[in-house]
Amino acid sequence: MAPLTIAPATPQDTSEISALLARAYAGLEQFYPVEILKPVMPLFATCNHKLVASGRYFVLREDGAVRAVGGWSEDAPGTASYAPARGHIRHVGVDPKAGGRGFGRDLLEAVEADAVQNGMTELEAFANVPAVPFYLALGYTRLGSRTELISGQYEFDGVDLRKRL
């Protein structure tokens, strides 16, 4: 087995992160109509520099290759909404060629550990439809379905989940 590392992302990782996110989210075409995905894919497949700068966005590498990415923030995505001790999972993606090998689980465990070290007692996620079983398998509870307004203009259906840490 090749060596795995999980570390905070750096500005030098942004192009690799964006490339992985593009590959990871390309699979959404099986679950959402093209008219929904076309405007949001450039947003989904672009590294969030603010998350990287926060030190709370992580890269999992296998033998140097980026296989999974993701992180957390205290504020809810797209808002300034804040609840004490509640963090929010952000921009998770796993290389589809590496799916089923536990990289997503390993990455999310590191994200959760970092959130706990920073005083969080629970994490919430707004997951796309195919990601819901992944979060449920890791102990997240389904709160309900909703439509998120991406960038204030694009409706995207997903599921809210929460986990007590």
Image (spheres, grey):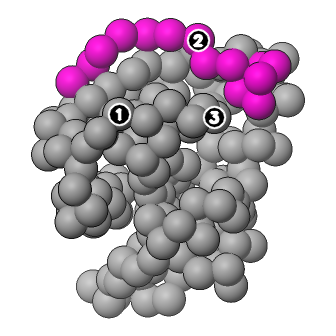
Residue 33 placement: quadrant: top right
Write down the quadrant of residue 12 in the picture.
Answer: bottom right
Residue 64 at x, y percent in the picture: 50, 89
The disc labelled 1 sits on which kind of residue? Ala
Query: Eyeballing the image, is 84 above or below 104?
Result: above
Q: CA distance from mark 3 to mark 1?
A: 14 Å
Q: Quadrant of residue 80?
A: top right
Amino acid type of the residue tagged 3 in the rendering = Gly
- Residue on which the image places disc 1: 83
Tag 2–tag 3 contact (CB < 8 Å):
no
- Location of residue 53 with respect to 151 vertically, above or below: below
Inspect the image, locate mark 2, and give the three-letter code of the amino acid beneath it.
Thr
Q: CA distance from mark 2 to mark 3?
A: 13 Å
Residue 112 included in the magenta stretch of the image: no
Front-lying residue, 61 or 88: 88
Residue placed under numbered mark 3 in the picture: 78
* Badge 2 vs badge 1, beta-carbon distance below 8 Å: no
Magenta segment range?
141-154
Judge left or right: residue 133 versus residue 56. left
Q: Nearer the viewer, mark 2 or mark 3?
A: 3
Point 35% across, 83% down: residue: 5
Magenta span: predominant SS is strand
Look at the numbered disc 1 and give the secondary structure of its residue: loop
Label placed on residue 147: 2
Distance from Cα at disc 2 to Cα at disc 1: 21 Å
**Residue 117 appears anywhere in the view:** yes
**141 w.r.t. 53: above or below:** above
Q: Nearer the viewer, mark 2 or mark 1?
A: 1
